[in-house]
């Protein structure tokens, strides 16, 4: 479903991606791990076509992302943003139905609300939440609303950007479980970037370790803990000693 072949991206003299090769099969959940500033977010933006790579090819279901019709292409994606990114001036249901109220996927208002309420139920929120505003919700509830919005238009691919950031361990576990259930239930291709190793173990089929602009290791999540790659082992253990230099 997603293929990156020798993808490079620099910003001035700073080389962020230095030849990334990565694939995600249809229905597969791929989690990208790596330290802050290693290019994980840039990688997702390149796949979405928000940033154009300097070199290399990225395809989604065989289509070059740089040549795709933007509206039609982006309609295939759902996104759960790190900070929730809910619109404060809109009610919860309007946030969930944001895509359904505009553009090519526009639905009648009543139908969009009905779909939004159903998606809220799917993530464990009751219908009475629909008319509240994001400021009236806890962090965990806001994250669930963001997840409901990500699946509202039935996307083929969902990106999760640090899905458990700012949540306590129990709520993180709830969100991880919801993500895994939804990915399996909908049969979507999922790509997640995270530092949270509990999330990795909960939602990944395949793991890719990004460091210094390249994929240092990739493989099934079941092989992650026994892999001998020194970069991966240091990251998993959180050790200050190893090939990854800690910024002081």
Image: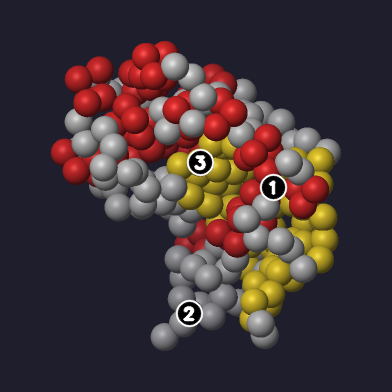
Residue 182 position, x and y percent, is 49, 25
The first of marks 2 and 1 along the sequence is 1
Residue 80 position, x and y percent, is 46, 42
The crowd level at tag 1 (other Cα within 10 Å; few <14, some 14-19, many 20+) is some
Q: CA distance from mark 3 to mark 1?
A: 24 Å
Which mark is drawn over residue 79? 3
- 19 sits to left or right of 109: right
Number of labels in the image equals: 3
Q: Nearer the observer, disc 3 or disc 1?
A: 3
The first of marks 3 and 1 along the sequence is 3
Task: Identify the secondary structure beneath mark 1.
Answer: strand
Residue that numbered label 2 is attached to: 246
Please name the colour scheme applied to the rendered image.
secondary structure
- 45 sits to left or right of 149: right
Determine if residue 124 is in view.
Answer: yes
Determine if residue 184 is in view.
Answer: no
Residue 121 position, x and y percent, is 33, 18
Residue that numbered label 1 is attached to: 219
Which residue is at the front of the view, 57 or 217?
Answer: 57
Which residue is at the front of the view, 196 or 26?
Answer: 26
Q: CA distance from mark 3 to mark 2?
A: 30 Å
In the rendered image, which quarter contains the C terminus?
A: bottom left
Up-down: is 52 above or below 182? below
Q: Nearer the observer, disc 3 or disc 2?
A: 3
Which mark is drawn over residue 71? none
Up-down: is 227 above or below 198? below
Q: CA distance from mark 2 to mark 1?
A: 25 Å
- Residue at 53% x, 52% y: name it: 193
């Amino acid at each position: 479903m997603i293929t990156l072949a020798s993808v490079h991206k620099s910003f001035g003299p700073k080389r962020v991606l230095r030849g990334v090769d990565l694939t995600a099969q249809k229905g597969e959940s791929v989690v990208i791990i790596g330290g802050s500033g290693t290019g994980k977010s840039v990688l997702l933006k390149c796949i979405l076509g928000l940033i154009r790579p300097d070199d290399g090819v990225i395809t989604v279901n065989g289509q070059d992302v740089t040549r795709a019709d933007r509206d039609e292409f982006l309609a295939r994606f759902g996104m759960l943003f790190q900070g929730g990114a809910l619109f404060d001036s809109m009610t919860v249901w309007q946030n969930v139905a944001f895509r359904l109220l505009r553009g090519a996927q526009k639905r009648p208002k009543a139908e969009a609300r009905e779909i939004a309420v159903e998606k809220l139920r799917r993530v464990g929120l009751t219908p009475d939440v629909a008319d509240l505003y994001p400021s009236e919700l806890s962090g965990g509830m806001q994250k669930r609303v963001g997840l409901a919005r990500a699946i509202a238009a039935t996307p083929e691919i969902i990106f999760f950007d640090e899905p458990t950031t700012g949540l306590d361990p129990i709520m993180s576990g709830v969100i991880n479980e919801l993500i895994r259930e939804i990915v399996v239930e909908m049969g979507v291709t999922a790509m997640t970037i995270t530092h949270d190793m509990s999330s990795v173990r909960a939602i990944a089929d395949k793991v890719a370790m990004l460091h210094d602009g390249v994929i240092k290791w990739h493989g099934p999540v079941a092989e992650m803990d026994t892999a001998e790659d020194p970069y991966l082992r240091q990251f998993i253990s959180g050790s200050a000693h190893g090939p990854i230099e800690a910024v002081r």
